[in-house]
Image: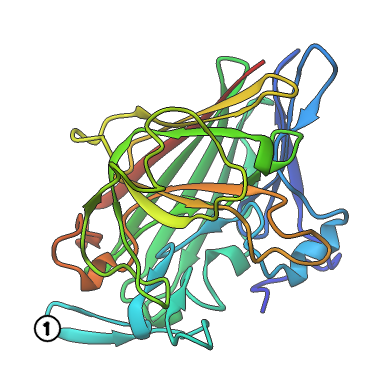
């Protein structure tokens, strides 16, 4: 269900750009990124996967380029406890019974107020989630700011304020391919550990070293036929903006360096993509808090207290 669909039947759009630099198309629906065109020596390359038509985003099943929240990733069995009270959420994963990306009315289905901020390089997206929306407590004011920095970098700033204690975890769900096939891309992740999952893709609560496992991406490796849908515990101990991952297409030398203040990075190889796309046509690098953290005391806390403000930043820095 699309919340507050525009009269035209299509999401509103805005484009931010810098002369000779990035060209980024944004949507009001889901505060989504619809394209990132990167200049290269052989002409501009769209670095992410996009629907062919704007109206296709209205029926999106893949969270394509969207802002995800108020809680990204999974919350086990669609429930969590906070301050001795249990909250029940939309269990939109029918097979597992988990809540994925905050259910059917998450931020990816909300229409944001989308405004350019006085120049062509920055845009602000705003929306409000009422208390109880999606089962989560608190009236939450959501602000997502996109800005082109250093000509070839796209920064995303996430801000949330709440009037009740709640849980928050925001990310962006762009599918990167850097103009090629993800099997041919090289990836590295600055992480010494990951969070193993059970048969339903829910973290077990363990944080396990990547050494000796298929999840050791500390040195660049070709993706090939490896499948990922896992959270990596980033080597970021100070909540500062630090490089978390690098993705490179050897065919055109286009490279993405991802910087973030977040503690985790969900790497998803897009295996469940289907028409109008094909499986594994794009790779998600979702900088975020840990999945199911409200139910895993050993994970970094996702609690946001009333009157406090959630602030996180992610930067996609391109080079060619």
Q: In which quadrant of the rendered view does residue 86 lie? A: bottom left
Q: Is residue 122 above or below residue 294?
A: above
Q: Residue at x 63, y 34 (%)?
A: 185
Q: Residue 55's x, y, as percent?
A: 84, 63
Q: Is residue 249 visible?
A: yes
Name the spot of residue 298 as percent of width and height, x first: 14, 61
Residue 164 in sight from this viewpoint: no
Query: Looking at the image, is 35 positioned above or below residue 206?
Result: above
Is 23 left, or right, of 223 in this rendering? Answer: right
Quadrant housing the C terminus: top right
The colour style of the image is rainbow
For the N terminus, the quadrant is: bottom right
Nearest the eye: 208 or 140: 208
Residue lying at the far front of the rendered structure = 212
Q: Give the percent coordinates (x, y) of residue 163.
A: 27, 66
Q: Name the residue carrying label 1.
A: 84
Q: In the displayed structure, does residue 239 sit left or right of residue 153?
A: left
| Quadrant in the picture for residue 249 | top right
What residue is at 57 percent from the left and 41 percent from the top? 223
Across and down, in percent, residue 149 comes to 55, 20
Give the tally of numbered discs: 1
- At label 1, counting other C-alpha atoms closer than 10 Å, the crowd grade (few under 14, some 14-19, many 20 or more) is few
Which residue is drawn at the image coordinates 19% and 33% (left, top)?
Answer: 238
Q: Is 91 or 220 nearer to us in this picture?
A: 220
Dot 1: element: loop
- Between 3 and 293, the residue placed more toward the observer is 293
26 or 116: nearer the eye?
Answer: 26
């Amino acid at each position: 269900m699309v919340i507050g669909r525009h009269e035209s039947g299509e999401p509103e759009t805005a484009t931010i750009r810098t002369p000779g630099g990035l060209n980024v198309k944004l949507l009001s629906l889901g505060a989504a990124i619809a394209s990132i065109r990167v200049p290269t020596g052989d002409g501009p390359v769209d670095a992410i996967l996009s629907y062919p038509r704007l109206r296709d985003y209205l029926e999106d099943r893949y969270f394509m380029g969207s802002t995800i929240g108020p809680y990204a990733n999974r919350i086990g069995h669609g429930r969590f406890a906070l301050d001795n009270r249990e909250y029940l959420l939309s269990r939109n994963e029918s097979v597992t019974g988990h809540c994925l990306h905050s259910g059917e009315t998450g931020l990816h289905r909300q229409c944001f107020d989308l405004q350019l901020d006085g120049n062509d390089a920055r845009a602000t997206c705003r929306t409000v989630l009422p208390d109880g929306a999606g089962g989560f407590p608190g009236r939450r004011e959501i602000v997502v700011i996109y800005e082109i920095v250093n000509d070839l970098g796209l920064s995303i700033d996430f801000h949330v304020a709440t009037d009740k204690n709640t849980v928050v975890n925001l990310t962006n769900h762009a599918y990167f391919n850097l103009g090629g096939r993800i099997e041919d891309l090289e990836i590295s992740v600055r992480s010494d550990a990951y969070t193993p999952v059970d048969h339903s893709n829910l973290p077990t609560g363990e944080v396990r070293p990547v050494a000796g496992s298929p999840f050791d991406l500390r040195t660049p490796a070709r993706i090939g036929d490896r499948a990922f849908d896992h959270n990596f515990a980033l080597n970021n101990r100070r909540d500062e903006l630090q490089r978390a991952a690098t993705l490179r297409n050897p065919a055109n030398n286009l490279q993405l360096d991802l910087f973030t203040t977040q503690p985790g990075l969900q790497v998803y190889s897009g295996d469940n993509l289907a028409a109008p796309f094909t499986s594994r046509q794009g790779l998600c690098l979702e900088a975020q808090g840990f999945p199911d953290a409200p139910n895993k005391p050993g994970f970094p806390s996702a609690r946001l207290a009333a009157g406090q403000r959630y602030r996180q930043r992610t930067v996609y820095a391109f080079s060619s």
